[in-house]
Image (spheres, helix red, strand yellow):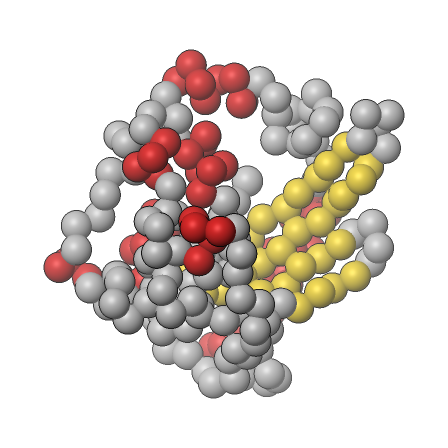
Amino acid sequence: MLAQRIGAQYLIPVISVGVNIDVAADGTLEDVSGEFAIALPGKWCLSCARIYDAEMASIELADVPEKQRWIQRGYINGADVKAPAVSHLNMVVANLALTEIHNLLAPFKAPILHMGYNQLRGELVPYMDQRNPNCAICSDSALLGMGDLEPIPDYEQAGHKRSNLMLPSTNQWADDGEIDENTDLIEEPVDSENLAVHHDP
C-alpha cells in the first residue's frame, strides 16, 4: 500500500511480484501460482487491479500480539510449513516481470502489464485492468501527482487500528466488493527512470 501511494504521488512506476501456495487438508497442493503487475502513473494502480488486500494489509501491520497469531500460521494456507522451497516458482514469475520491464525500456512487443502464472496447469493468464475513476489512490481527484503536497501516512504506527488501514470508501471494492473488469491495455513505452519495486510475500 505504501509503495503504491508513493508511486502515485510522485509518478513513479510500481512493480508488484508475488506467489501463492495452497495446501489441502490431505496435504495435496491445491494452488501453486504467482503474478506480477506493473502499475504506471496515470493508468491503473495496484489498488484498481486488486493486487493487494486491504484486510490482509491490516493484519500484516497489526500490533505484535495480533501479528504473532498470524505469523504462527505460516504463509501457506492450510499447512504448517514456515519456509517452503519455492525458488523455481519465484524465478518464473520474477523473470516474467523482468521481461515486461525490459519491454518498457526497449519495446519489442505489445506490453502485458499484469499476468498470472498457474504452475500446476502450466498456464499464463494476462489480465487487462482499467483505472477506477473513483480510486482513492490514483484517480485525478485523489493522490495522483500530489508529491510533497500530501503527507505520507505512517502505516506502521497506525497498524493496530484496522479502520485506518482500510482503503477510503471511494475505492471500488471498499463499498461493495465489486470491480469493473473492463480492459485498458497500455501500448505505449514509458519513461522508466526510478522504478519503485513492491514485493508481496
Task: Determine whether 8 is above or below 102 in the image.
Answer: above
Is 37 on the left-hand or right-hand side of 194?
right
Is residue 99 toward the left or the right of residue 189 in the image? Answer: right
Q: Position of residue 26 (x, y in %)?
A: 86, 25
Residue 7 location in percent, x, y? Answer: 33, 60
**Front-lying residue, 164 or 157:** 164
Q: Residue at x 68, y 31 (%)?
A: 77
3 horizontally vs 39: left or right: left
The furthest residue to the left: 149
Camera sees residue 15: no
Q: Residue at x 57, y 67 (%)?
A: 181
Q: Nearer the viewer, residue 75 or 24?
A: 24
Q: State the image quarter where residue 148 is shown.
A: bottom left
Expressed as whole percent of the image width and height from the top left, the position of residue 122 reads 82, 58
Q: Estimate the x, y position of residue 85 in percent, counting from the top left.
A: 71, 35
Q: Residue at x 61, y 31 (%)?
A: 75
| The one of 167 and 94 positioned closer to us in this rendering | 167
Residue beneath the point at 39% across and 26% down: 62
Residue ranking furthest to the top: 65
Q: Quadrant of residue 113?
A: bottom right
What is the tally of numbered marks visible in this picture? 0
Q: Is residue 167 above or below residue 85?
A: below
Asked whether residue 2 is in view, the answer is yes
